[in-house]
Image (spheres, grey):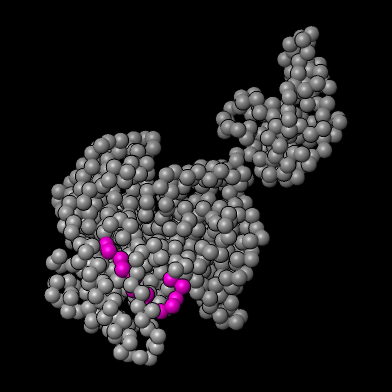
């Protein structure tokens, strides 16, 4: 059992218990050559969050000193406890809870299922040092015996392989994608498209040191990196992912063997398990691929038109399609008392909302399927919760606000500028603002330049609770953010997958920006599922040369050739109806509620606004124009125009063309 690492997780308020426990446990650790680590080991100048996570990931035994303060610590709940329980679930570590006081640890979702050492029953007086010492001596013996009996780390150093079920899950991400799966911050698996071949190699610790990567990231967030600097960052990312020349050649060969043609682009999926989630926070959009296609023997993955980069966390998850009549988006913001930041946040929110009426004709068609609410300012968590409870569920919440990092975890603020009050929310608290059944499918965290990294860190934790999270990770101007948002929501309404929509939006924004390279890395998207929005496709009116009629596309398909004459008021007071010439949908007419799209009476609703046809009153003169079933004695007469005299001769005006259960009487 040599080289066993034992990690001590505790709340800072319980430091005296931690010190006493380690002192009593020390003889057992020394005699068994076990290494005990706790955050007091962190050297001055080191990144403490990185040190904690690194040792937590390497730990074979994790001792939890559980108390009221332990259970109320955001960092413990969001980082240490999640990692510890996941490692135990995967059989990678032995987790031992030591209960220090009479806290409500039994109400935790997982802790009661683990056999604990209950020293709280042995401490009746917290001021009695001898009593505390005796109780923790008992805990030290119990932990020692459990470690010896449990034999953690027995498989340490053994070759790790993907289980068949893991391979199947990863294949489901996209059978035509190159999947790079990082496991345990130690191994990288390369899965090729449509094949059984899987390559495995150790995760590199080479490339630029973590400190240098951190410096480059901070410069990137400030917008101070030039293209050459970005290339240094991109090369370091490539060296971090692929351990040596052999591993790099395997990836390059895989890429060259599966270059996309003129059709579907090639997806490169970076999939990180829970132990490797901190690596997912690196700006992978700047990954530099050393391939001869680029101008200087390489290129940034974000700038290549035929590539889609996807970041995935936790379990692979299957495809998730969100079906809705409209894509409902909330643009929310909260501005702090600092005027400069407050103005920037408000400008960003208003700029994004102003794009709810796009200029391009091809986008207008899709934006009929999008309903944007806002921009709404929220000054407190309670205000936000109350608003969400009253409204219909939003598919996307686009939140523009201030963030910060505290104890290694990203936080977001609700601010009351007048009262100079800031209410900081951890990821799990923010998600709880959405009651059951009203949780969004996508949360878009949009921060001013000083908060980009904080909200990206928050996104890493949010993805465990929602399908997808998007965070702006480089500083951009309000107009650039609006360009990105407009194209993103247009693409999602058009049925693109989240990763594809994000990539296309970034390239669209880059083409319109003076700082092309920065815009390629504007966003970091994380998802549990392969997320896709499927919204109704209501008909869009298109004026034609025929002054008597308005033409619309059928809501069931987008064939530009097949156009249907709908039940619409036209010149001279005449009315036109139709059944679709391709799919026979209908009868179709103009919705009396929104006056924007057709109604399919057989579906009992408006494709645009959801108005129920059962509420409609159809005037007799209009009902008579709806075609009825041909009588057996009728002669086949080709109608000249719907609603015309010739057409009415061919059909009996009092009989239905076919049974329409949704047709109002």
- State the residue at coordinates (37%, 83%): 123
Total labels: the figure holds 0
- State the residue at coordinates (54%, 55%): 440
- State the residue at coordinates (37%, 35%): 262
* Residue 601 highlighted magenta (yes or no): no
Q: Where does the image place residue 517, in percent across and percent down from the top left?
A: 36, 57
* Residue 101 highlighted magenta (yes or no): yes
Q: Where does the image place residue 639, in percent across and percent down from the top left?
A: 74, 18
Q: Quadrant of the N terminus?
A: bottom left
Above or below for 65 versus 226? below
Above or below for 518 versus 52? above
- Read off the magenta span: 93-105
Above or below for 369 versus 587? below
Q: Quadrant of the C terminus?
A: top right
Left or right for 469, reference 370:
left
Left or right for 444, reference 416:
left
- Report whether residue 591 is seen: yes
Out of 533 and 520, give the one closest to the viewer. Answer: 533
Q: Where does the image place residue 360, in percent across and percent down from the top left?
A: 57, 46
Out of 71 and 318, give the one closest to the viewer. Answer: 71
Q: Where does the image place residue 142, in percent across and percent down from the top left?
A: 26, 72
Q: Quadrant of residue 97?
A: bottom left
Above or below for 369 versus 224? above
Left or right for 503, reference 642:
left
- State the residue at coordinates (13%, 75%): 31
Q: In the displayed image of the protein, which residue is found farthest to the right?
A: 620
């Amino acid at each position: 059992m040599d080289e066993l690492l034992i990690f001590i997780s505790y709340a800072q308020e319980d430091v005296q218990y931690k010190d006493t426990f380690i002192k009593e446990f020390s003889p057992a650790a020394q005699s068994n050559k076990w290494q005990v680590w706790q955050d007091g080991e962190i050297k001055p100048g080191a990144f403490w969050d990185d040190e904690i996570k690194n040792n937590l990931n390497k730990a074979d035994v994790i001792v939890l000193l559980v108390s009221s303060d332990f259970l109320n610590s955001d960092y413990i709940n969001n980082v240490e406890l999640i990692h510890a329980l996941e490692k135990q679930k995967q059989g990678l570590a032995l987790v031992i809870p030591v209960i220090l006081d009479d806290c409500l640890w039994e109400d935790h979702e997982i802790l009661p299922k683990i056999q604990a050492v209950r020293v709280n029953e042995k401490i009746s007086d917290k001021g009695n040092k001898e009593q505390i010492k005796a109780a923790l001596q008992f805990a030290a013996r119990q932990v020692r015996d459990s470690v010896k009996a449990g034999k953690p780390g027995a498989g340490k150093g053994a070759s790790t392989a993907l289980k068949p079920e893991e391979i199947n899950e990863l294949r489901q991400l996209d059978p035509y994608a190159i999947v790079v799966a990082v496991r345990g911050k130690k191994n990288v698996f390369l899965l090729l498209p449509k094949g059984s071949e899987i390559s495995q190699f150790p995760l590199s610790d080479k490339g630029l040191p973590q400190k240098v990567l951190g410096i480059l990231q901070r410069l990137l967030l400030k917008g101070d990196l030039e293209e050459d600097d970005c290339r240094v960052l991109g090369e370091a990312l490539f060296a971090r992912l692929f351990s040596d020349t052999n591993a790099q050649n395997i990836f390059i060969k895989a890429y060259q063997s599966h270059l996309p043609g003129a059709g579907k682009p090639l997806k490169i999926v970076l999939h990180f398990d829970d132990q490797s989630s901190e690596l997912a926070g690196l700006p992978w959009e700047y990954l530099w691929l050393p391939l001869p296609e680029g101008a200087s023997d390489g290129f940034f993955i974000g700038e290549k038109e035929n590539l889609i980069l996807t970041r995935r966390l936790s379990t692979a998850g299957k495809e998730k399609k969100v079906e809705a009549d409209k894509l409902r988006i909330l643009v929310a913001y909260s501005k702090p008392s600092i005027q400069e930041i407050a103005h920037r946040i408000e400008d960003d929110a208003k700029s994004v909302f102003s794009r709810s009426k796009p200029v391009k004709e091809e986008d207008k068609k899709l934006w009929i399927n999008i309903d944007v609410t806002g921009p709404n300012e929220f000054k407190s968590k309670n205000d936000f919760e109350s608003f969400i409870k009253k409204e219909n569920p939003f598919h996307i919440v686009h939140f523009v606000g201030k963030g910060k990092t505290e104890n290694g975890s990203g936080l977001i603020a609700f601010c009351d500028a007048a009262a100079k009050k800031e209410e900081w929310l951890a990821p799990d608290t923010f998600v709880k603002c959405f009651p059951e059944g009203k949780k969004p499918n996508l949360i878009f965290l949009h921060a001013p330049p000083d908060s980009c990294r904080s909200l990206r860190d928050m996104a890493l934790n949010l993805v465990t609770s929602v399908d997808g999270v998007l965070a702006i990770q480089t500083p951009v101007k309000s107009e650039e953010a609006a360009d990105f948002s407009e194209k993103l929501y247009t693409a999602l309404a058009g049925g693109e997958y989240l990763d594809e929509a994000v990539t296309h939006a970034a390239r669209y924004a880059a083409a319109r920006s003076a700082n092309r390279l920065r815009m390629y890395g504007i966003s970091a998207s994380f998802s549990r599922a392969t997320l896709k929005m499927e919204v109704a496709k209501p008909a869009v009116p298109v004026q034609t040369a025929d002054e008597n009629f308005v033409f619309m596309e059928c809501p069931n398909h987008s064939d530009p050739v097949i156009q249907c004459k709908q039940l619409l008021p036209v010149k001279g007071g005449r009315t036109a109806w139709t059944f679709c010439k391709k799919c026979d949908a209908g009868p179709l007419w103009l919705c009396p509620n929104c006056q924007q799209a057709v109604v399919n009476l057989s579906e009992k609703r408006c494709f645009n606004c959801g108005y129920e046809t059962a509420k409609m009153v159809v005037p007799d003169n209009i009902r008579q124009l709806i075609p009825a079933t041909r009588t057996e004695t009728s002669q086949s007469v080709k109608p000249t125009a719907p609603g015309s005299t010739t057409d009415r001769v061919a059909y009996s005006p009092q009989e239905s063309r076919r049974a329409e259960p949704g047709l109002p009487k």
